[in-house]
């Protein structure tokens, strides 16, 4: 469906054409009309589906219709979990609204508070922010919430996972009651639905490309590997297959730093981003990766939220994420903009249970490919071998492990006084030996 059929203005359509967009994606077709209708929305949509434009375009159009020359009042708030996602969403707001008279600002930690405050004082129509920095500006009276008409929570599942729900609740307590609320999440988990119950009023449920359905453009492969050989296999895969742009996901920043060193030592130019890096360092690392100055970008799950690399061909999961739903966010970085992608997962024997959870979430088994020299050995039982009978069986009692003797074992008779057993006396033994010598 064309954007013109969705009732968007000529200014917005022109901006979309400048970006090379001519027709709406399924999530945009479903989301935009409901946004115009003013109802609260809970939408399940994966990254890379065009969900950002789905809520940004209607907000831009509605605010531009009511705009009065020279007067900028805060009317829309978009809350996101990470600074990278904040920058990405704000870039979309600016690009789609380039022919409109609206002003927007992005707020996130790690940037100068004073410069942000000065931009806010100049008047703003839309704020894209992380919840923590937004609260800081609220505390300093840099933001007036009286005229807010729209609240969007983007990647609500991540907001919950990162523990930001209390900050969001604090912000909500200061907003006008009459407003349109939009909650977007890649996974509509129980936690997300409970959050929706607190925020949304009789919401319209929209599910497009949520959970595992968006992975149709992504080929998923698992390589079983001996844990100690993971680094070596990772380097081998990238080098031997000549991958030119690879995003490697890890759970911990310590592992990310280790891989950064190892891959660079092996000759693969690599950058790293995680929560321990400053905003400037992370931005430069991402820019180098996008522009091809580095071949590999190692990232933790949190730092990688919001990364927008439309033509990324390969994602490698160095490990299984702590939160199973993060797997969807990881592989959603490839296979975007209608192009096919490849998602490789390296699993050691101890990660098999976590892998099963991922497969349950995806609704299918993931193809396994063994690579000679790296695959863990599976010990098989020998055919025809005699089985040793273990007479003692371990059973769990109420207070822990107990040993239960087999009924085949002969029961030992209790010793009584009739047995007349002798007690060893060292002095008597010595005297007996002396008598024998005299004889």
Image (cartoon, rainbow, N blue to C red):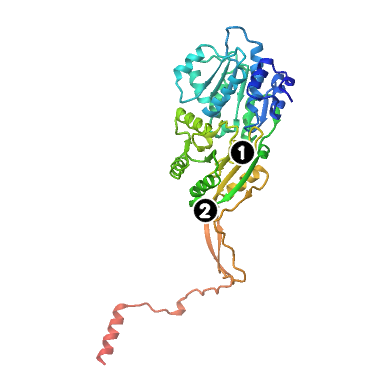
Q: Residue furthest top?
A: 69
Provide the secondary structure element on which disc 2 rests: loop
Q: Could you tell me if the residues under marks 2 and 1 are in contact, i.e. CB atoms within 8 Å? A: no
Residue 63: x, y in percent?
64, 14
User: Within the image, what quadrant is residue 50 found in?
Assistant: top right
| Residue at point 64%, 13% (across, down) | 64
User: Within the image, what quadrant is residue 164 found in?
Assistant: top right
The answer to whether residue 203 is seen in the rendering is no
**295, above or below 434, in the image:** above
Task: State which tag comes first along the sequence, 2 or 1.
Answer: 2
Q: Can you say which quadrant of the picture contains the N terminus?
A: top right
What residue does disc 2 label?
226
Provide the secondary structure element on which disc 1 rests: helix
111 on left or right of 172: left
Q: Can you say which quadrant of the picture contains the C terminus?
A: bottom left
| Residue at point 50%, 46% (across, down) | 235
Are there few (<14), some (14-19), or many (20+) residues within 10 Å of tag 2? some
374 on left or right of 57: left
Residue 286: x, y in percent?
51, 31
| Disc number for residue 328 | 1
């Amino acid at each position: 469906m064309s954007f013109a059929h969705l009732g968007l203005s000529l200014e917005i359509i022109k901006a979309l054409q400048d970006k090379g967009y001519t027709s709406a994606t399924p999530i945009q077709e479903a989301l935009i009309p409901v946004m115009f209708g003013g109802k609260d929305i809970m939408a399940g949509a994966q990254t890379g589906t065009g969900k950002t434009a789905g809520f940004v375009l209607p907000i831009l159009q509605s605010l531009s219709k009511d705009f009065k020359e020279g007067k900028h009042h805060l009317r829309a708030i978009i809350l996101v979990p990470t600074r990278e996602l904040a920058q990405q969403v704000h870039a979309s707001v600016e690009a789609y609204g380039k022919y409109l008279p609206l002003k927007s600002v992005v707020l996130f930690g790690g940037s100068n508070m004073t410069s942000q405050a000065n931009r806010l004082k100049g008047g703003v129509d839309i704020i894209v922010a992380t919840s923590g920095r937004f609260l800081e500006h609220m505390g300093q009276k840099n933001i007036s919430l009286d005229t807010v008409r729209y609240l969007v929570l983007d990647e609500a599942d991540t907001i919950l996972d990162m523990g930001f729900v209390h900050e969001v609740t604090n912000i909500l307590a200061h907003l006008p009651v009459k407003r349109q609320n939009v909650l977007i999440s890649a996974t509509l988990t129980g936690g997300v639905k409970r959050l929706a119950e607190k925020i949304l009023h009789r919401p319209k449920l929209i599910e497009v490309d949520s959970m595992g359905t968006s992975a149709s453009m992504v080929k998923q492969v698992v390589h079983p590997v001996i844990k100690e050989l993971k680094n070596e296999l990772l380097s081998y895969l990238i080098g031997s297959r000549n991958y030119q742009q690879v995003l490697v996901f890890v759970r911990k920043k310590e592992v990310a730093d280790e891989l950064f060193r190892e891959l660079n030592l092996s000759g693969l130019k690599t950058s790293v981003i995680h929560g321990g890096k400053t905003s400037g360092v992370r931005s430069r690392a991402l820019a180098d990766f996008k522009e091809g100055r580095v071949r590999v970008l190692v990232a933790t799950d949190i730092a990688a939220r919001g990364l927008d690399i439309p033509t990324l061909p390969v994602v490698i999961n160095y490990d299984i994420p702590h939160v199973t739903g993060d797997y969807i966010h990881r592989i959603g970085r490839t296979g975007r903009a209608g192009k096919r992608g490849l998602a490789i997962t390296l699993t050691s024997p101890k990660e098999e249970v976590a892998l099963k959870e991922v497969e349950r979430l995806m609704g299918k088994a993931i193809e396994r490919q063994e690579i000679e020299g790296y695959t863990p050995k599976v010990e098989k039982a020998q055919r025809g071998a005699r089985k040793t009978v273990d007479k003692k069986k371990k059973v769990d009692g109420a207070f822990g492990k107990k040993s239960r003797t087999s009924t085949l074992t002969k029961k030992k008779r209790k010793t009584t006084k009739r047995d007349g057993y002798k007690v060893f006396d060292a002095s008597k033994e010595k005297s007996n030996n002396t008598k024998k010598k005299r004889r």
